[in-house]
Image: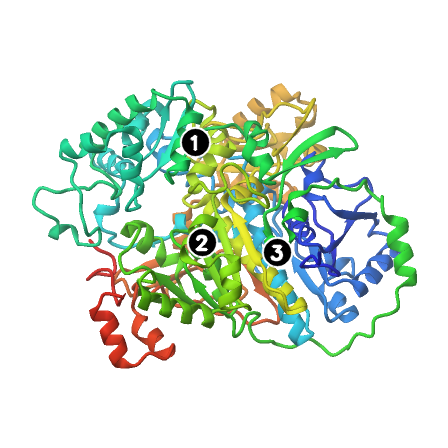
Amino acid sequence: MTLPFENIRVLDFGQYIAGPATAMMLGDQGAEIIRIDPPGGARWKSPAMDTLNRRKKSIVLNLKKESDVEIARNLIASADVLIENFRPGVMDRLCLGPETAHAINPRLVYLSLPGFASEDPEMAHMQAWEAIIAASSGQFTDMGLNRVLMGIDPSFSPLTLASAYAAVLATASVSAALYARESTGHGDCIEVPIASALMEGLVLNSMFIEDKPKRYNSLRENEIERRQAAGEPLDISYDQLQAYMDPFYKSYFCADDRLVYIVSACHVDHCHRALDILGLREEVLEAGLPELDDWYLPSNKWPEGVDCALGLYPLTQKWADWVSGRMKQRFLGKTSFEWERLFGEAGVPLTAHRTTREWLHSTHALASGLVHEINDPMVGKKKAAGPVAWLSGAAEFAAKGASAPRPDQDRIEILSKLEKQKPLLQEKTPLTQNGCWLEGTKILDMTNVIAGPTAAAMLVRFGAEVIKLDPVKPTFDPWNTIIIGMQVHRGKRSILADIKNEKGKELFLRLIKWADVITFNGTTRQLRSLGIDRESLESMSPGTVLCQLNAWGGPRRGPRSEHVGYDDLVQAATGIMARFGGALDTPEEHAHLGTIDVLTGFSAAFAILTALFHKKRTGKTDVARASLSAAGQLLQIPFLYDYEGRAPFDEPSGPHARGDGPLYQCYEAADGWFFLAVDKRAVNRLETIEALRGISRKTVEELFDFLADTFRTRTVKHWVHQLCKADVGAAPMASMTGLREKYLSHAEMDVHARGGTFQFTRYADHPSGHTVDLFSSCAIRPQYARLVVPTPAEKYGKDTRQILVDLGYSNREIRNMIDAGMVSESWSEQYLPD
């Protein structure tokens, strides 16, 4: 078996999560990873580092010693990739920065993962702790509608979103640069600011649509607006909050006193099937809950008396209360795991809630290879997160875990190989501007909602041409397709076609033969029903790479592999909801829309690039794979491991969490909130601040009250200035709305390849007719490759006619296809039905 990145050598200088995770993912594809540990080993002393360092070799280098710096230079001469995530300038001071590295090895792909952009005059040199990045990016203040209604602001989450998003974006960009290098011979220098990556991951949360129609407001949004207009406090309890949850997006107790979570609105079939399983469909329809054949009609054209419809999100409060009550009674009739099996077999999205520990030990997680079981030399039998993405041909390799090396374990082997290594005859010409990494690559995007479309959307910026294929009659409601589509379909062309009749199958075949890559989110059974499983595709278009992503997929088959699911369900099944809500009986969806979805899309893009690289090197095509479950595990990497004798799973949880101890905490100042992050070994730095003198003599018990009382006496600006001056991590608690207003470019499409950490673009003339603000695609910043600025997402079907012309159809054939309803140029009269 030839692994995709076999014979690719990666030097991992990374610390904490982002850098090591990037190297881990390349190692999971067969790359040789040489970890450069500092004296004393990794700075982050956590068992999670064993997961991040699997399959690596270790050498300890003291980069303050010239002899060890020389070893590093010799390693650079033989490397393909170098990864570091230090503050800007650190590697330059060690004489190992990109300019020096490329002088040694022009083919090197040099990856830098600073906390904030190196060209950001405000933030470049801030201490970039995970929570400092989160606070600076609005993550802790924009924590979702639940927290707004409950009046909780700010709130802390231990999920390492920023590092996870950055690591996958970084791995994808490195893979793209290696793919292009096969043709150009050129390396590159890529910067991925972790805060910019976080904002790309949360792009759907910072998006603003001016005059968005009220029909898309949820019950929670309506209640927030009502209370604000009436001057009522936003202070409801968790139990009261449940009344404002749509019945098809909700948790229900079962016969075993465990909750299940159902996500069955917005899809034309799911809510109907859910009611069938519960034996409620006829009762609901007889009670008068309307159905609406065309969800894309403007609401003023709905039949008289209709103000909501079964399946169309959201229901009105009256119907939500009634349907929820009936569903609540029925769910008490069976256990949570019985319902999970019944709904899964019927193709309806539902899961039982679990803790993270329960997920690690669950039958599906282990059988599918999503969770690795290894014999660790220190702790014995251990369970830990498996791969983030993989190729089908290397699935068995991906399913098997590996132990991490001890610091300096491989020193003799590494130095021995260096001595025998022949000097590489590198062309010493300076690197120059190249084209796009994926120039000429064609992608047929058959995905829906968030995760799938994100994969192809990300590759647009690398130069790929994307055709988005959707059915003539939509499967999902306008909120999922059009509002979310404003972000995930930028830069794509759109065709609407019925590919299930004979004429449609012929069109589908032409599209398949046009494509270098096909992206599809669904189960293997769904793939086979369309005739694009691996075997069928091999006979139709042998060179086309298939990318499959789904909810529960792993390298191997498991009992839930054919179950359908969404982001929210994976949050519930892997423990994210229980942690965010504080307990299994008070689970809460993690605040941000698309938390796992967007990360899965990034992971799928990485898998596609891996498959393309493998094909270019070997001539063999393979299936690129990613899943929501795999991405959900990466978000929990600091605590996703278990073994006998493990410390309790006691990471911060619940709505009132503000941090992880007094030195890593949200604090209230006289005029607002900020985040403090101090290494316990650096507490003496606080002694340089007059108001904090004597702090190093405080006990842990005394520390929080002392800091909380002291910080309330002065402003956020005062404390952040004083703390940063003392070289301590501190940042004001930003909001996404504030960041958008501060960093918005009013010149449409004025997106900078470099520049500041936070960049927003205003589409004043958006095709929707609304003014739309989006976070700019600025997290991946190559020095030599060219990136494409994506155009706004056009109306679905706008390009149907031109795509058919490009595929060789005559004008007469096209007219006949439109008249027969086999293809369409639109789903609705309006871009965004009001």
Mark 2 highlights which residue? 527
Left or right position of 403 against 266: right
Residue beneath the point at 60% across and 66% down: 782
The answer to whether residue 310 is above or below residue 172 is above
Front position in the image: 728 or 593: 593
The amino acid pointed to by label 1 is: Arg
Disc 2 element: helix
x then y, percent, for residue 647: 66, 24
Q: Earlier in the sequence, mark 2 or mark 1?
A: 1
Rendered image: mark on residue 341 = 1
The amino acid pointed to by label 3 is: Thr
The answer to whether residue 493 is above or below residue 172 is below
Q: Quick check: marks 2 and 3 in contact, CB under 8 Å? A: no
Q: Earlier in the sequence, mark 2 or mark 3?
A: 3
| Crowdedness near tag 3: few (<14), some (14–19) or many (≥20) residues, C-alpha within 10 Å | many
x then y, percent, for residue 169: 56, 55
Front position in the image: 250 or 81: 250
Residue beneath the point at 72% across and 59% down: 6
Disc 3 element: helix
Rendered image: mark on residue 811 = none
Mark 3 highlights which residue? 171
The answer to whether residue 832 is above or below residue 428 is above
Left or right position of 275 against 573: left
Left or right position of 390 against 264: right
Front position in the image: 456 or 784: 456
The amino acid pointed to by label 2 is: Leu
Q: CA distance from mark 1 to mark 3?
A: 36 Å
- Report whether residue 369 is seen: yes
Q: Quick check: marks 2 and 1 in contact, CB under 8 Å? A: no
Q: Earlier in the sequence, mark 1 or mark 3?
A: 3
Disc 1 element: helix
- Report whether residue 247 is seen: no
